[in-house]
Amino acid sequence: MTKNGLREHLPKSSKGAYPFRIGTTSFIYPDHYTPNVKLLGAYLDEIELLLFESVMPESLPVEGEIKELARLAKVMDITYNVHLPTDVGFGHPDKKKRCVAVDTIKKVMDLTNILSPSTCTLHLSYDRPSRDPESVADWQSIVHESVGNLIDKGVPGRSISIETLDYPFEWVKPIILDFDLSVCLDLGHLMIYGYDMESTFEQYSDRTAAIHLHGVENGQDHIALDRLSEQRMDAVMCILQQYCGTVSLEVFCFEHLKKSLAFLEKHWKARHFL
């Protein structure tokens, strides 16, 4: 990732190359948010700000850094989406911890509001030891209450996108519909956990605010896109040709990003004769 001690840049810009906004994560270079945006902003349409951790005070960007990110958005002609913290649980059995989770998510959304994110992606993680109907129903009820508490704090439903994770997405469909939430379609997660990408997209295409795209191979995800089989990539391309929102290449290092961009461009050109 470095040449002669300098950080390597992407070989070409992908800005405006697709009907959708193409982006990647804020953790491509081993550095903070602002340096990553400065290095990536000239090449991409959007940056996914990964705010995974919230427990430690220094884990979230401070107000000054958020203001700098807002300035860079104007200068570099980029937009942002925000991945909300994953270390809090809307479905936690302890009500106090659920209240902390709701307050934390609201705090992060308030912090990043000046960035006008295209979406704020939320994990509704299922961490119960059993997947029997009674356990699922109890979890659904608790999560429904937590999401309702967040909406009651003035958060617009469509500003939140619920991400496809390791359980059947039908489990959260009533919550999405009841509160008019958006969807974050993580195609890599759908692949690795054996769910159908195209049927899921067809069902939620009208509310899909973001697509997370990454390679999957031998039980590993979030790797370079070129690790996908041709069959899987064909399915991905069928979805992307119908989509005009945000596509985030959700990888976490420079080499995976460079390979993913090249692989996506090759397949896009092959289908559009560019």
Image (cartoon, rainbow, N blue to C red):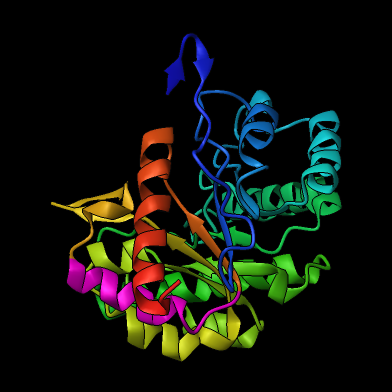
Q: Nearer the viewer, residue 102 or 2?
A: 2
Which quadrant of the structure image shows residue 102? Answer: bottom right
The residue closer to the viewer here, 260 or 16, is: 16
- Image coordinates of residue 103 in percent, x first then y, are 72, 51
Q: Residue at x 55, y 80 (%)?
A: 175
Direction left: furthest residue: 218
Could you tell me residue 24's position as x and y percent? 53, 49
Magenta stretch bounds: 230-244
Residue drawn at (82%, 53%) of the image: 113
| Front in this rendered view, residue 37 or 66 | 37
Viewer-nearest residue: 238 or 110:
238
Q: Is residue 51 above or below residue 118?
A: above
Left or right of 270 on screen, residue 184: right
Who's the residue at 45% across and 18% down the image? 2
Determine whether, in the image, residue 187 is placed left or right of residue 92.
left
* Residue positioned 27% across, 75% down in the render: 234
> Can residue 126 be seen here?
no
Question: Whole-percent x and y of residue 47?
Answer: 62, 48
Q: Is residue 161 left or right of residue 158?
A: left
Q: Does the rendering let one see residue 55?
A: yes
Q: Is residue 252 magenta?
A: no
Q: Is residue 19 above or below residue 57?
A: below
Residue 274, how many percent across, how many down?
Answer: 45, 71
Residue that sits furthest to the top in the current view: 5
Q: Look at the picture and state if 166 lies above or below 170.
A: above
